[in-house]
Structure formats: structure tokens, C-alpha cells
């Protein structure tokens, strides 16, 4: 499982967004191809569509939690509640380790900065100033720890 954590970080460092990196590292466990994982998580990078809202790495964590514990019946209130409880537990752990769930806060951005859709170029400076690789690593690590505690 440690390999999956490193895979998530490597995916991020190769240019995938934070959410894609987390989801793709675990996708095969749930019957998804790499391409399907990358597509399903694509919109959540940069704090959901680069809007700097909920951290994309955390969103990726929540996506895999849904693959593991999500209810599949519309009337399964118990199943929905169980999944929501897992997501809330994971969110609390992510926030405890990183200080926030909000992308803009994690990046130290000012609220007045304009939202643009163009991703930043991935340079050495980008990786130096952004904590995103750490967020990806933490999200993947939290998921690995969850799976160890709750094996199927």
C-alpha cells in the first residue's frame, strides 16, 4: 500500500492534478482503468475546477471513499449515512493534518485573487511554492490507513 502513496505523488509530479493523482493511485482496486480514474477526478483539481474551494486531493480521497463505501440503492438511507460518516471522518483527519480542507487556504492565497481556468506551468518553482504534493501524499496516506483499519 505504501507503493500507492508514492504512485499518487509521482502522478502529481508528472503533471496530473491533485484529485486525479489520488484517485488514479487506487482506481484498479475498484475496477476502474487509469483513464477512467483520470477522467472522473479531472474536474476536482485546484480546489474544484481551480476555484480554490475544497482541496482536490481531499476530493480525490472522498471519491475513493465513495467507491469503497458508497450506497448504490436510492432508498438506502443507512448506507448513505455510513458513507457520509466515513467522509466526515476522513475530512476531519485531513483537516487535522493540514490545517484546512480549503485549497485557497492551503495555498495561502488572498481572497481577492481572480479565478482563472488556466493551470500553472509545472516548474521547479511551482513545486517549491505549492504544498500540493504533500496534500496528495497525505490524502493517499489517510486512505491507506483507513483501509488498514477497515479491511474488507
Image: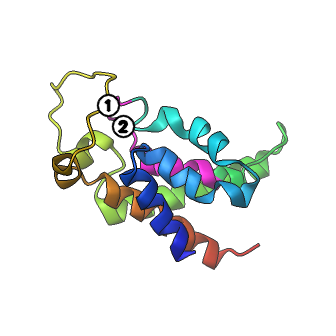
Numbered disc in front, either 1 or 2 = 1
- Magenta stretch encompasses residue 148: no
Q: Which mark is residue 119?
A: 1
Circles 1, 2 touching at the beta carbon (< 8 Å): yes
Image disc number at residue 46 = 2
Front-most of 28 and 94? Answer: 28
In the image, what residue occupies the spot 57% across and 52% down?
A: 24
> Could you tell me residue 111's position as x and y percent?
18, 30
Q: Residue at x 57, y 41 (%)?
A: 38
Q: Residues within 10 Å of mark 2 (few under 14, many from 20)?
A: many
How far separated are the C-alphas under marks 1 and 2? 8 Å
Q: Which residues are magenta?
A: 50-65
Classify 3 as above or below 15. Answer: below
Query: Which element carries disc 2, helix, strand or loop?
Result: loop
The percent position of residue 95, horizontal first and vertical second, equals 36, 58
> In the visual, does 53 lie left or right of 104?
right
Side of 35 relative to 12 (left or right)? right
Q: How many numbered discs?
A: 2
Would you say 11 lies left or right of 86 here?
left
Residue 59 located within the stretch drawn in magenta: yes
Amino acid at each position: 500500500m505504501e507503493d500507492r502513496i508514492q504512485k499518487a505523488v509521482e502522478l502529481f509530479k508528472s503533471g496530473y492534478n491533485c484529485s486525479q493523482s489520488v484517485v488514479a493511485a487506487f482506481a484498479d482496486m475498484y475496477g476502474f482503468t487509469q483513464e477512467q480514474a483520470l477522467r472522473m477526478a479531472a474536474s476536482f483539481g485546484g480546489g474544484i475546477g481551480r476555484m480554490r474551494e475544497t482541496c482536490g486531493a481531499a476530493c480525490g480521497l472522498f471519491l475513493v471513499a465513495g467507491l469503497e463505501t458508497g450506497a448504490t440503492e436510492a432508498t438506502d438511507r443507512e448506507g448513505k449515512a455510513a458513507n457520509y460518516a466515513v467522509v466526515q471522518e476522513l475530512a476531519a483527519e485531513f483537516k487535522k493534518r493540514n490545517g484546512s480542507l480549503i485549497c485557497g487556504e492551503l495555498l495561502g492565497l488572498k481572497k481577492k485573487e481572480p479565478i482563472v481556468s488556466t493551470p500553472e506551468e509545472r516548474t521547479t518553482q511551482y513545486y517549491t511554492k505549492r504544498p500540493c504534493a504533500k496534500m496528495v501524499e497525505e490524502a493517499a496516506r489517510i486512505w491507506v490507513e483507513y483501509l488498514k483499519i477497515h479491511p474488507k
